[in-house]
Image (cartoon, rainbow, N blue to C red):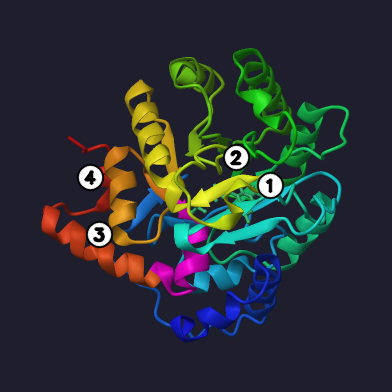
Amino acid sequence: MFEKIRGLIFKLDPETAHNLAIKTLKFNFIPNKKVQQNNLLETKIFGKKIPNPIGIAAGFDKDAEVYNSLFKLGFGYVEVGTITPLKQYGNPKPRVFRLEEDEALINRLGFNNSGSDKVRSRILSSPPTGLLGINIGPNKDTKDRVKDFLVGLRKFHDIGDYLTINISSPNTENLRNFHNDEEMGELLEEIQTEKDKLKTNIPIAIKISPDLEFKSIDKICEILIKNKISTVIISNSTDRTRENLKNINKLEKGGLSGKPLENKSNFLINEFYKSFKSDITIIGVGGIDSGRSVYEKIINGAKLVQLYTGMVFKGPNIVFKINNELIEIIKKTGVNNISELRGSKK
Ligand SMILES: Cc1cc2nc3c(=O)[nH]c(=O)nc-3n(C[C@H](O)[C@H](O)[C@H](O)COP(=O)(O)O)c2cc1C
């Protein structure tokens, strides 16, 4: 079905097409295809079992409107957001560009969302039917970004399965400064102190940029372990890697996602995997659109994966297709569960 109407959808401006997808998913009229249950894919995370390790990445369901429909599409878990304390419009339109020949998107949305109060009440009124991550960030005009992260923690610690600290959007000026040792250390210490005050044990993930300096990886790992961060998401979109793209929009300002990000993300996953001396969970993101691309991230060291751009190009059935492809790949390796393949790249 998607293949037949893809041409029509691609005639629409990408943000309009996205809003239409959200409206359609809101009806929750997804045919009740049986969710694939297969021991090869079942994964344990944050003390819960999920049917497969494939999640929808932050940015698709920014406002937490359709997560239960996304579970029905087969996603093993869903990450909503990025949500800021106060509602914000984001950057002027147009702000999303489709690079069809490159199987990529460039976006400079700038954290458009309804704000944390609205999103909190929305989640409370529609209990998630699967594992839900909530991605938080600061408002553009805030005077204190650390405080904004703490607001997010207070608002969502009791209703999510994990929280993601997003320090890696290329579309909020200087947000990526939190990759510097000192700023990262301070932020994560404040988060830990606030968690202690709230007496919450919610797992914290940190989402990092693919454009960080490779030489800082060991230091970042040290800071994450010291501050009890359980999970690192690798990676957000890149503001580099434009040289080899074909589409006319290739130099639009913003974050590039999809196929051109894949190798960079896989490389970083492997570097972090090798650098961690303790068991931090890696969620691999960037360019996933097939069973093979998930397999690559897992053997490089990811425990879970997420995708966004792949669904724009391959349609809403993508998780079912990926799961079937993955099952075939895993069977050939002879292992009993996908988790046994983690970090097995020679
Ligand atoms: C249109 C769009 C909006 C996004 N918004 C967010 C966001 O709000 N927060 C975030 O952490 N990542 C956001 N991302 C980044 C994705 O979560 C993901 O890290 C990145 O797109 C790489 O994965 P992909 O190649 O599968 O798309 C966005 C990506 C796209 C394409």
Q: What's the magenta region?
A: 306-319
- Of badges 1 and 4, nearer the viewer stands 4
User: Gap in Å between the C-alphas at discs 4 and 3?
Assistant: 10 Å
**Was residue 111 drawn as part of the magenta stretch in this picture?**
no
Name the N-terminal-most of marks 1 and 3: 3
Q: Look at 44% across and 70% down and name the residue there.
A: 314
- Residue corresponding to mark 3: 40
Q: Is mark 2 within 8 Å of ligand 1?
A: no
- Residue corresponding to mark 2: 202
- Residue corresponding to mark 1: 158
**Secondary structure found at label 2:** loop
Residue 143, percent across and down? 88, 28
What label sits on residue 340 in the rendered view?
4
Residue 301, percent across and down? 32, 37
Q: Quick check: marks 1 and 3 in contact, CB under 8 Å?
A: no
Instruction: Give 213 or 294, whichever is nearer the viewer.
Output: 213
Q: Look at 67% across and 58% down and name the residue there.
A: 96
**Secondary structure found at label 4:** helix
Residue 127, percent across and down? 65, 65
Which amino acid lies under the numbered mark 4 shown in the image of this protein?
Glu
Relative horizontal placement of residue 148, taking residue 32 as reference (left or right): right
Residue 141, percent across and down? 87, 36
Which amino acid lies under the numbered mark 3 shown in the image of this protein?
Leu
Which amino acid lies under the numbered mark 2 shown in the image of this protein?
Ile
User: Gap in Å between the C-alphas at discs 1 and 4?
Assistant: 32 Å
**Secondary structure found at label 1:** loop
Relative horizontal placement of residue 35, taking residue 332 as reference (left or right): right
